[in-house]
Image (cartoon, rainbow, N blue to C red):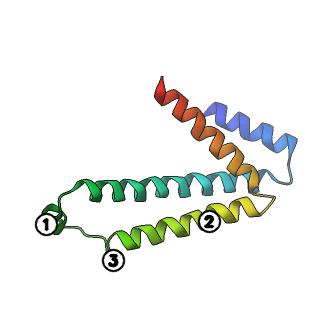
Amino acid sequence: MTTALLFAVYLNYIMPENVFLVIASLATFATVWVWIMILLSQIAFRRRLPPEEVKALKFKVPGGVATTIGGLIFLLFIIGLIGYHPDTRISLYVGFAWIVVLLIGWMF
């Protein structure tokens, strides 16, 4: 926690005009990424279930997989908007770099 706060102070020192926008767009990227993973997990879960178990599910997504795919398309649109605006594009760079670091850590 202390490291994160010190990093925020450093960011405020080097770019005081944009620090709030950068941190807010990073939080947006993280939230969108988590929801993308949730939706992909739901699709993978449904594909592994036999049809009779899918019918027996107590909590079904309205619209089924089509709704999930629609949600994924919308979230990818949001990622595209983050990348379209130059002020928020840095969050994509940092976010994808963080994902690479997490994947490397997971592999080892």
The crowd level at tag 2 (other Cα within 10 Å; few <14, some 14-19, many 20+) is some
Left or right placement of residue 7 versus residue 68 in this view = right
Left or right placement of residue 33 versus residue 50 in this view = right
In terms of secondary structure, where does tag 3 sit? Answer: loop
- At label 3, the amino acid type is Gly
Q: Is residue 82 above or below residue 97?
A: below
Query: Residue at 57% of width from left, 40% of height from top?
Result: 99
Q: Find residue 80 and report its horizontal and vertical position in percent.
A: 66, 63
Q: Is residue 106 above or below residue 81?
A: above
Query: Residue at 17% of width from left, 58% of height from top?
Result: 50
Q: Picture quarter containing residue 8?
A: top right
Tell me the residue that label 1 is attached to: 56
Query: Residue at 54% of width from left, 34% of height from top?
Result: 102
Q: Nearer the viewer, residue 51 or 41?
A: 51
| Disc 3 from disc 1: Cα separation | 16 Å
Q: Nearer the viewer, residue 23 or 81?
A: 81
Tell me the residue that label 2 is attached to: 78
- At label 2, the amino acid type is Ile
Sequence-first disc among 3 and 2: 3
Sequence-first disc among 3 and 1: 1
Q: Is residue 97 above or below residue 25?
A: above
Q: Find residue 87 and report its horizontal and vertical position in percent.
A: 80, 58
Q: Is the residue under label 1 in contact with that under label 2 (CB below 8 Å)?
A: no
Q: Is the residue under label 2 in contact with that under label 3 (CB below 8 Å)?
A: no
Q: Find residue 43 and report its horizontal and vertical position in percent.
A: 35, 59
Q: Is residue 17 above or below residue 97?
A: below
| Disc 2 from disc 1: Cα separation | 34 Å
| Disc 3 from disc 2: Cα separation | 22 Å
Tell me the residue that label 3 is attached to: 63
In terms of secondary structure, where does tag 2 sit? Answer: helix
